[in-house]
Amino acid sequence: MIDSSFLDELEQFELLVKRRVSSLYAGERSSTKMGRGVEVVDFREYYPGDDFRLIDWKVYARTDKLYIKRFMEERDLTMHLLVDSSNSMDFGTKKITKYDYAGSLAAGFGFVGVENQEKFAFGLYSSHLKQVSPQGKDRLHLMRILDLLNNAQLSGKTNLGQSSAMYNRFVKTKSYFIVLSDFLEPLHQIREGVHRLSRQSIDLTLIQVLDPLEKNLGLEMDVKLEDLETSQQRKCFISPGFRQEYQGRLKQHISSVADICRDFNANFISVTTDQSLMNVFVELMGGWRRG
């Protein structure tokens, strides 16, 4: 179940949250969009597919990098929240599973959307896109999403590439995307998913949620491990050397996911379920959107 105490904390710290996200949310605010004939507000790096006519050659002369101009224009932006509901998310050695932790963070983003009259949409995925909510920005919309989160049946393997291809069909304009998952899947699927979502996004953030036991492998001697996505079981002897090799492989996988995100100018954050939801959320909101 979604952590209701976390939502209560958000209610109590509403002013703090609003202050943290003032650069992103302002209700009926002006937001940045590519355009011409209006005031230039800043610059960002050029990416393949951008209008080359917006390149600022004076900036290029100073930095030796391609940057394009960004202009102020009224636009109603949408935040899309994608939560992994595969079997691997149904794991937790603390008081909360990875899925419930990820869902609680997603609900927190939705809460901020409601408080600031911002549209947000929601999707659950595993090997494919399982459920999608329409866009909305009121409290009733958030309550429906909470029901969807709490009643979801976790199943299947994770495939961000295939799921993002299905979800993109519902996205009509450039938007904000937040994906919450353990990202314990083949790297080529993650790369495909990040690539697809980045083409539709103004800002893309991947939030990895892991259980502390997964990260540290705090087990000893003979144990029987079960793959939640395949139901395969394997007996293992957890020696110091085995633990060190496991931690090294996991660290390399996480580093590779971060590299993929950098390749597509996406944000990547990794957290564990023993961290305070409120502390993590405030930190995420403080650094979510790049200037």
Image (cartoon, helix red, strand yellow):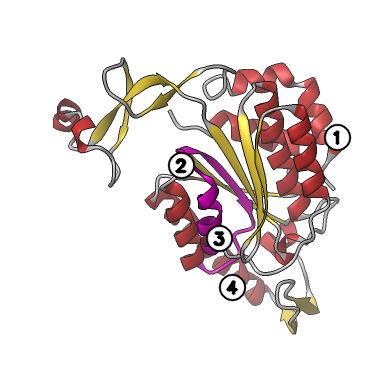
x, y percentage for residue 187? 49, 66
Neighbourhood count class around disc 1 (C-alpha, 10 Å): few under 14, some 14–19, many 20 upward: few
Kindly identify which numbered label has been placed on residue 201: 2
Label 4 residue SS: helix
Q: Is residue 13 left or right of residue 60?
A: right
Q: Is residue 153 visible?
A: yes
Looking at marks 2 and 1 on the same chain, the residue that comes earlier in the sequence is marked by 1
Neighbourhood count class around disc 4 (C-alpha, 10 Å): few under 14, some 14–19, many 20 upward: few
Looking at marks 4 and 1 on the same chain, the residue that comes earlier in the sequence is marked by 1
The residue that appears at 31% across and 15% down in the rendered structure is 39
Looking at marks 4 and 2 on the same chain, the residue that comes earlier in the sequence is marked by 2
Is residue 61 found inside the magenta-colored segment of the image?
A: no
Labels 4 & 1 near each other (Cβ < 8 A): no
Amino acid bearing label 3: Leu
Looking at marks 3 and 2 on the same chain, the residue that comes earlier in the sequence is marked by 3
Label 2 residue SS: strand
Q: Does residue 65 lie above or below 31 as drawn?
A: below
- Which residue in the protein does label 3 denote? 160
Is residue 184 found inside the magenta-colored segment of the image?
A: yes
Name the mark nearer the viewer: 3 or 1: 3
Q: Which range of residues does the magenta coloring cover?
A: 162-186
